[in-house]
C-alpha cells in the first residue's frame, strides 16, 4: 500500500472542461474541500473520493458525485485510488464546465484520467503501519532521546515535563523496536 504525503495538483482538459485534481493526505480532506469551494466559486462540481484506515485497522472509503450523473465521477475516481492501493489519501476534482456535454462514458473517462494523470506526477510513499508508545526519561537524557528519535525516524507526538519527561512517540514497528533497544538503559 502507498499514501500521499504532500498536496499535488494536476489540471486535465477535455472539450474545454477543466478537471483540476487535488491529491491530498486524508487528514486534511474536510478542510481542503471547504477551502476549494471558497477558492473556486464558479466551479460546477467538487467531486471527491477517499480511502483511510480507521482506529480498528479497517479500510473506509467513499466518494461523491457532487451533482454529476450517478456513478460517473466519484466512483471512477475511487476506483483509481483502489487500483493504486492508496490509503489515508483523498482526491478532490474541481470541474469547470466547458460548454460541451461529455456524456456518461466521457465523464467516467475524464474523471478517471484526471486522477490517473495526477498520480503519475505525484510521489507516493510506501505505507507502513505505525505503533504508538509512551516512555519516561530523566531530564538529563532529553538530548539523547531527541537525537535517537530524529536518527531513527521516530515521531514525537507529545513531550510532557513532569518529575521525568514523558514522551509519546510513534513509528513503524521496525523503527520502534530498534529505537527501544537503543534507549532501553535510560527509558522506563
Image (cartoon, rainbow, N blue to C red):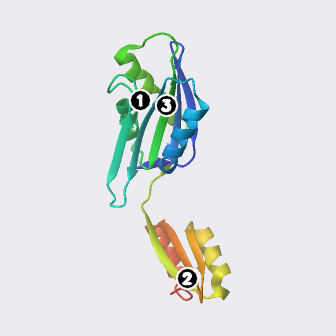
Q: Could you say whether the residue bearing mark 3 is in a helix, strand or loop?
A: strand
Residue at which label 2 appears: 183
Sequence order check, earlier mark of 3 and 2: 3
Q: Residue at x 35, y 24 (%)?
A: 72
Camera-side residue of 33 and 90:
33
Q: Are marks 3 and 2 in contact (CB under 8 Å)?
A: no
Q: Is residue 177 visible?
A: no
Residue 77, image quadrant = top left
Q: Residue at x 32, y 27 (%)?
A: 71
Residue depth check, mark 1 versus mark 2: number of the one nearer the observer: 1
Q: Relative to 78, is 168 above or below?
A: below
Q: Could you say whether the residue bearing mark 1 is in a helix, strand or loop?
A: loop
Residue depth check, mark 3 versus mark 1: number of the one nearer the observer: 1
Marks 3/1: CA distance? Answer: 10 Å
Marks 1/2: CA distance? Answer: 51 Å
**For the residue carrying disc 1, how many other residues have a C-alpha within 10 Å: few (<14), some (14-19), or many (20+)?**
some
Q: Residue at x 35, y 44 (%)?
A: 61
**For the residue carrying disc 3, how many other residues have a C-alpha within 10 Å: few (<14), some (14-19), or many (20+)?**
many
Q: How many marks?
A: 3
Residue at which label 3 appears: 93
Residue at which label 1 appears: 66
In the rendered image, residue 151, in percent from the top left (x then y), is placed at 61, 69
In the rendered image, residue 165, in percent from the top left (x then y), is placed at 59, 83
Q: Could you say whether the residue bearing mark 2 is in a helix, strand or loop?
A: helix
Camera-side residue of 88 and 69:
69
Sequence order check, earlier mark of 3 and 1: 1
In this picture, residue 159 sits left or right of residue 115: right
Amino acid at each position: 500500500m502507498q499514501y500521499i504525503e504532500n498536496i499535488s495538483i494536476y489540471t486535465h482538459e477535455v472539450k474545454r472542461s477543466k478537471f483540476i485534481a487535488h491529491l491530498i493526505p486524508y487528514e486534511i480532506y474536510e478542510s481542503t474541500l471547504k477551502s476549494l469551494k471558497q477558492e473556486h466559486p464558479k466551479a460546477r462540481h467538487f467531486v471527491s473520493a477517499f480511502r483511510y484506515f480507521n482506529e480498528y485497522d479497517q479500510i473506509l472509503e467513499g466518494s461523491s458525485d457532487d451533482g454529476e450523473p450517478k456513478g460517473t465521477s466519484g466512483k471512477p475516481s475511487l476506483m483509481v485510488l483502489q487500483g493504486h492501493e492508496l490509503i489515508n489519501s483523498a482526491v478532490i476534482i474541481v470541474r469547470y464546465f466547458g460548454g460541451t456535454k461529455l456524456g456518461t462514458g466521457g465523464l467516467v473517462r475524464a474523471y478517471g484520467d484526471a486522477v490517473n494523470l495526477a498520480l503519475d506526477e505525484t510521489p507516493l510513499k510506501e505505507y507502513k503501519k505505525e505503533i504508538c508508545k509512551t516512555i519516561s526519561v530523566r531530564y538529563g537524557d532529553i538530548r539523547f532521546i531527541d537525537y535517537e528519535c530524529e536518527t531513527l525516524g521516530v515521531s514525537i507526538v507529545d513531550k510532557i515535563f513532569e518529575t521525568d519527561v514523558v514522551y509519546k512517540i510513534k513509528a513503524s514497528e521496525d523503527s520502534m523496536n530498534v529505537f527501544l533497544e537503543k534507549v532501553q538503559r535510560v527509558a522506563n
